[in-house]
Image: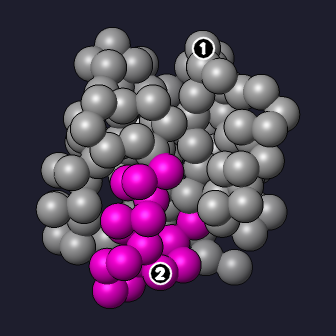
Amino acid sequence: MTELRKIMHVEDDPDIQEIAAIALEMIGGLEIVQFSSGAVAIERATSEMPDLLLLDVMMPGLSGEQTLLGLRALPGFETTPAIFMTAKAQETDVESLIALGALGVITKPFDPMTLADEVRALWETR
């Protein structure tokens, strides 16, 4: 099984971007590349080639689901594992995200001290 090294995080909220970067890079020891919109993530994804996609569900423009579908259409991203982050983690919402092929859903607000561990635990389920 390959080791998780690089995460593409797509999140429109700059505060959440900053907290996630601290949680994943400084605390978790992972490499993270961040984009503030799904459109930019899709445009620049092939130059990054992450091991994992970490996608906000509710964003202006493309939603997290639309972003995942756009990324899945790119060569090399057909099977890249994805995790969604959302403040609205109703059971039906989670089920629909899992049906899209997500490894899981992390609820916001998340604990910065355990975010990397949560991501790694979901990574191990693939």
Q: Earlier in the sequence, mark 1 or mark 2?
A: 2
91 horizontally vs 126: left or right: right
Residue ranking furthest to the bottom: 75
Q: 62 or 87, which lies in front?
A: 62
> Is 76 inside the magenta-drawn segment?
yes
Residue ranking furthest to the right: 91
The type of residue carrying mark 1 is: Pro
The type of residue carrying mark 2 is: Glu
Q: Residue 45's x, y, as percent?
A: 25, 65
The structure residue drawn at horizontal position 49% and vertical position 51%, both measured from the top left corner, is: 65
Q: Quadrant of the N terminus?
A: bottom right
User: Mark 2 sits on what residue?
Assistant: 78
Q: Residue 8's x, y, as percent?
A: 37, 52
Please report the bounds of the magenta region as a residue range.
Answer: 65-81
Colour scheme used in the picture? one colour
Name the mark nearer the viewer: 1 or 2.
Answer: 2
Q: Residue 31's x, y, as percent?
A: 37, 50
User: Mark 1 sits on what residue?
Assistant: 109
SS for callout 1: loop
How many residues crowd around disc 1 within 10 Å: few (fewer than 14), some, or many (20 or more)?
few
107 horizontally vs 45: left or right: right
Q: Which mark is residue 54?
A: none
The structure residue drawn at horizontal position 60% and vertical position 19%, both measured from the top left corner, is: 87
How many residues crowd around disc 2 within 10 Å: few (fewer than 14), some, or many (20 or more)?
few
19 horizontally vs 80: left or right: left
> Disc 1 to disc 2, how far (Cα)?
29 Å
The structure residue drawn at horizontal position 24% and vertical position 61%, both measured from the top left corner, is: 42
SS for callout 2: loop
Q: 86 or 22, which lies in front?
A: 86
